[in-house]
Image (cartoon, helix red, strand yellow):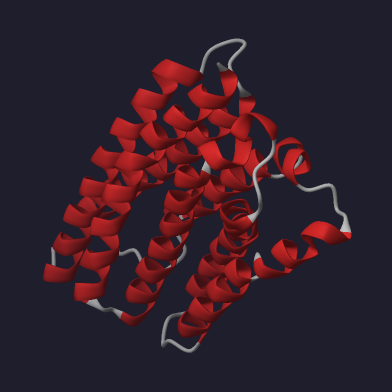
């Protein structure tokens, strides 16, 4: 096993342990009957990251590379942010945004999220990575961008009764940070940048550990 593959194995193992800790904490608390679907989807999203890192650890252990060809581990990020998007989209968002002119400025400002993710993806498109890897990263980037719109929007938009948005600003900030860290990791993989891989991995570890506990505190505030 080469030095880069050893580095990637350690990096993925660390993220696996952190996401597993967050997922198990959340699963014990929220993956039960009659619990808010919002919280369950966030926990399941973190579970997607956990499973993808488990796959990638096994993949690397067997001597395969993460960037040589398509491997399903890259879809874990896409699955996670599809859950994060679903948690904020619909019922939660409709509680704080009636679609009227009064909140138009916040809807416009929220586009900073997707545009920022698109700018980061440009660094992947311009990299020497293979086309199939760019396509896989592009799919994940698209879902990160979709989720980031609501993360940014719910960080900025005024609160409503019961503090639904205010209570989850911490979670939305962390989830947005996870999206950016995931993009940075993909850039590092596409460009074979070891130091950046480690930096992104460290950020994902911290954010993954904090995500569910912060969400947990927020949900408790507006459900009690």
Spot occupied by residue 169 in the image (x, y as percentages of width and height): 51, 46
Q: Name the quadrant of the C terminus.
A: top right
59 sits left or right of 152 in the view: left
Compared to residue 190, the image places residue 198 above or below, namely above
How many numbered marks have been drawn onto this rendered protein structure?
Answer: 0
Spot occupied by residue 6 in the image (x, y as percentages of width and height): 14, 61
* Residue 64 visible somewhere in the drawing: no
Q: Which residue is nearer to you in this view: 178 or 139?
A: 178
62 sits left or right of 34 in the view: left
145 sits left or right of 209 in the view: right
Residue found at x 23% / y 57%: 202
Which image quadrant is residue 142 in?
bottom right
* Residue 221 visible somewhere in the drawing: yes
Residue found at x 38% / y 77%: 190
Residue found at x 38% / y 63%: 181
Which image quadrant is residue 200 in?
bottom left
């Amino acid at each position: 096993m080469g030095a880069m593959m050893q580095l990637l194995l350690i990096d993925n193992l660390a993220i696996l342990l952190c996401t597993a800790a967050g997922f198990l904490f959340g699963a014990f608390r929220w993956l039960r009957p009659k619990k808010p679907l919002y919280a369950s989807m966030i926990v399941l999203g973190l579970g997607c990251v956990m499973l993808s890192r488990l796959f990638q650890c096994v993949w690397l252990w067997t001597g395969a590379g993460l960037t040589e060809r398509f491997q399903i581990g890259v879809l874990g990020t896409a699955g996670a942010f599809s859950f994060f998007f679903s948690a904020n989209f619909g019922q939660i968002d409709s509680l704080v945004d009636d679609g009227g002119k009064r909140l138009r400025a916040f809807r416009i400002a929220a586009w900073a999220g997707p545009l920022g993710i698109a700018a980061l993806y440009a660094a992947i498109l311009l990299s020497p990575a293979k086309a199939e890897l760019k396509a896989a990263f592009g799919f994940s980037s698209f879902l990160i961008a979709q989720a980031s719109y609501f993360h940014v929007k719910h960080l900025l938009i005024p609160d409503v009764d019961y503090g639904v948005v205010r209570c989850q600003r911490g979670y939305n900030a962390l989830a947005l940070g996870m999206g950016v860290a995931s993009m940075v990791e993909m850039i590092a993989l596409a460009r074979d940048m070891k130091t950046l891989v480690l930096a992104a991995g460290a950020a994902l570890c911290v954010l993954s550990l904090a995500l569910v506990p912060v969400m947990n505190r927020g949900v408790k505030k507006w459900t009690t």
